[in-house]
Amino acid sequence: MGKYKLLLKYKDPENNISIICDNAQEALHYKRQSIKQGYEVEVRRLNEEENTKKV
């Protein structure tokens, strides 16, 4: 199980949205909704290293 980051791109860059989901099912749900609302969606799987801050 990994985390997914969705970047929702709209015509106006000020309206871009970033969403972090806990699983693929949730990411797919948001992706489908966003496409219906006119957003271009970019999905990335986050690695564990990106989720935690190294000290």
Image (spheres, rainbow, N blue to C red):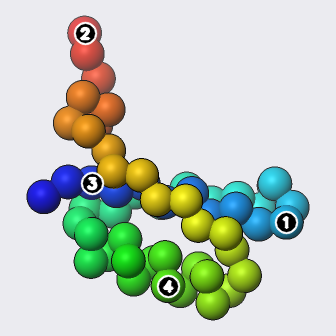
Location of mark 4 (residue): 32
First-in-chain label (4 vs 1): 1
Packing grade of label 3 (10 A; few <14, some 14-19, many >=20) is some
Q: Secondary structure at mark 4?
A: helix
Task: State the CA–CA distance, disc 2 to disc 1.
Answer: 38 Å
First-in-chain label (1 vs 3): 3
First-in-chain label (4 vs 2): 4
Relative to 28, is 5 above or below? Answer: above
Task: State the CA–CA distance, disc 4 to disc 1.
Answer: 18 Å
In which quarter of the view is residue 46 placed? top left
Q: Is residue 10 left or right of residue 36?
A: right
First-in-chain label (3 vs 2): 3
Q: Is residue 17 left or right of residue 28?
A: right
Location of mark 2 (residue): 55
Task: State the CA–CA distance, disc 3 to disc 2.
Answer: 21 Å
Location of mark 3 (residue): 3
Relative to 35, is 9 above or below? Answer: above
Residue 48 picture location, percent across and down: 20, 36
Mark 3 vs mark 2, foreground winner is 3
Q: Residue at x 46, y 78 (%)?
A: 30
Location of mark 1 (residue): 11
Task: State the CA–CA distance, disc 4 to disc 2.
Answer: 37 Å
Residue 38 picture location, percent across and down: 72, 82
